[in-house]
Image (cartoon, grey):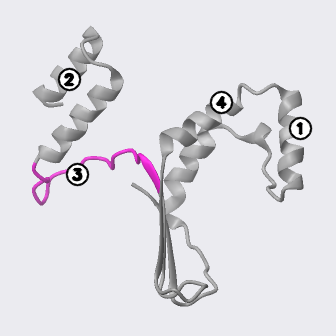
Amino acid sequence: MNEQRRQILQMLVDGKINADEAERLIDALEREEPEAAPGTLARPKARPKYLRVVVNSEDTAGGDGPGRVNIRVPLQLLRAGVRLASLIPPQALTQVNAELSKSGVPVDLTQLKPQHIEDLVEHLDDLSVDVDQPDTKVQVFCE
């Protein structure tokens, strides 16, 4: 660990900065550091922060020309949602699951665990999406 990182972590321990500020400072340090020289060990991949869904279409359904959808969801929001779901009383979860099922969303919130989100994020590189329109491209990835 280099000295600048150590100083940031010490400021965090001392209460001079909060965790979000420490994360921003460390991210800034990583952007400033030169890329690893060939033959050196590469640093592990950074933890993704966003779930991204991008849809590009050459022609929209209405025939208005090209269309684009770009959704960027903070993974922290998904992680927080999973933690909040664990606080819902079991009776309420049963009712929520029944309503979701009636709406065509077959999700069992009683089975949702924080590890599931991390597994999902880890495996998103293998995701493929089939689209009926040949001129439409869909990308789902984490960044």
- Amino acid type, callout 2: Ile
Report the residue marked by disc 3: 42
Earlier sequence position, callout 4 versus callout 1: 4
- At a point 12% along the width and 45% down the height, the residue shown is 33
**x, y (%) of residue 48?**
41, 48
**Image marks 4 and 3: residues in contact by CB distance under 8 Å:** no
Crowdedness of circle 4 by 10 Å Cα count: few (<14), some, many (20+)? Answer: few
Which of label 1 and label 2 is nearer to you?
A: 1
- Amino acid type, callout 3: Ala
Rounded to the nearest angstrom, the CA distance separating label 1 from label 3 is 48 Å
**x, y (%) of residue 90?**
85, 28
> On screen, 74 above or below 1?
below
- At a point 51% along the width and 86% down the height, the residue shown is 64
Q: Please give left or right for residue 112 compared with residue 105 in the image.
A: left
- Amino acid type, callout 4: Leu
Report the residue marked by disc 4: 84
Which of label 3 and label 2 is nearer to you?
A: 2
Instruction: Tell me which secondary structure the magenta stretch mostly adopts.
Output: loop
- Toward the viewer: 43 or 4? 4
Which of label 2 and label 4 is nearer to you?
A: 4
Earlier sequence position, callout 3 versus callout 2: 2
